[in-house]
Image (spheres, grey):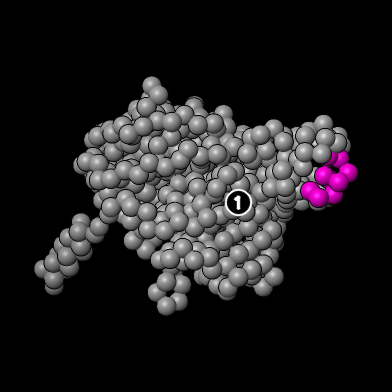
Amino acid sequence: MMAVVTRSLLSLALAAISLPAAEWTRFRGPNGSGIAEGSALPEEIGAGKNVVWKTAIPMGKSSPVVTASHIYLTAHDDGKLFTLALDRKTGKILWRRQAPGHRDEKRHKLNDPAAPTPVSDGTNVYVFFAGFGMVSYTSDGAERWRLAMGPFTNFHGMGASPVLAGGKLLMICDQDQQAFLTAIDMKTGKPAWRAERPDMVHSFSTPIAHSMPGGRTELIVPGSYQITSYDVDTGELLWTVRGLTYQVKSVPVIKDGILYFNGWAPGGEPAERLELPSFEEMIKLHDSNKDGKLAKEEIPKPWQPGNWDMQDLDKDGLYNSRDWLCYQMRRTSTNATMAVRLGGKGDVTGTHVLWRYDKSLPDVPGVLLYKDVLFLVRNGGILQTLNPVTGKAIKQGRLTHAMEDYYASPVGGDGKIYLIGMQGTVSVLKAAGEWEISGKGEFGEEVFATPAIADGHIWVRTATALYDFAKQ
């Protein structure tokens, strides 16, 4: 009997040894969910808590992605753009490759030349730099292909990350002029199709893939004022949901055929909405020099934009009909967290939006759906939970030890939620509607990147280092 028990235990041990390592291969992990289960995670993380290793790395705000053996990051140093590969177990930098070029484009002061997160197919890595375009490398650091893209006309600089679906590399390039979605062959780097998005202006949300009945895959893309869905094989526009804010930064999550998304931008609060005349009416009443465009001094002061350049899409110093429409839509846009039932064809706004919630919304961080609860964190350390079925608030409170701005999205696993503020303050929460703080930590430097989780480890990129944490 003892021999049988011993053999059984040995078989279990060998099976455990042979299990493939879990991965986190895109921004926010498995299909952007932000969740990794299967192993115990540390109660606390920080500069001196549960550290497995720490590696100094160059500047950058992209998040780490993790394969069975590698961790990939992008960075910049001395005016050059780089892709880095680290050994997953030790943190040793295995290789560092410079991008083929670096075109310095306009961006917000909080944006970064290495902001978009890489994506991996488990072996190869694919990186996007606004200052060059797309590059793919093998796990050994050999360049597979390159594809120059741009220049881009995003008012705050590019921010979305590439994703993989249906054998294609997909990149959303929403900008103020000639916005588009492109699908690229993973093996060759050659464009497969391109979908023009003429109604879009600058946005920063990373898309999410969803498997449809019949074996097809759709790519769901939040953008200016609307969410759109495309067939991954062909680029065909499938459906649209209207009613978003004008400038989206958050990322969607999907569970059981329902998509959850949060969009917030300045001016989208009910008290700030302003109904403006049409462009034709404005030209008729206020175009004093009769040039068919609007100069700033021709617009009545109560209606003048606070940031003229943001809506001056072609940067000619005047507003044409498209510029004015963008401004009109911005002043009537709606900030909201929403739930959308997937499927349908065409404009499904009236039939597929299940609920909207418009109070105390995050700016950049994505929503996290974990343990049947939606978690939202906003600047000032205000955390609230929502019922994902009804959209009703469960609890709102302030992380009193971490009342700072938030750019990293929350992630979860092992019944815990990890939140890291911009100043590097960590909150570990019990994952429940009536959440409680169970652990704290400090990095003592800025954190913008969203953590990665796999096999009981959590990796955090700070301003100067990449950390690996595990339960000690």
Whether 79 is among the magenta residues is no
Dot 1 crowding, Cα within 10 Å, few <14, some 14–19, many 20+: many
Residue 284 within the segment the image draws in magenta:
yes
Residue 250: percent from left, percent from top: 57, 49
- Against 4, is 155 above or below? above
Instruction: Give coordinates of residue 129: x percent, y percent.
Output: 41, 38
Q: Nearer the viewer, residue 67 or 418?
A: 67
Residue 267 in the image, given as x and y percentages of width and height: 74, 43
- Which residue is at a point 17% across and 68% down the rendered structure image? 8
Q: Is residue 152 left or right of residue 123?
A: right
Count of labels in the image: 1
Q: For this view, does 92 lie left or right of residue 286?
A: left
- Write the residue at 72% across / 47% down: 321
Quadrant assignment for the C terminus: top left
**On screen, residue 180 above or below 87:** below
Whether residue 403 can be seen here? no
Question: Furthest residue to the top?
Answer: 78
Q: Which residue is mark 1?
A: 200
Kindly report the secondary structure that dominates the magenta region of the rendered protein.
Answer: helix
Residue 197 visible in this rendered orientation of the protein: yes
**Disc 1 residue type (three-letter):** Met
Q: Nearer the viewer, residue 124 or 449?
A: 124
**On the rendered structure, is 323 left or right of 4?**
right
Which segment is the magenta one? Answer: 279-287
User: If the image is split into quadrants, where does the N terminus sit?
Assistant: bottom left
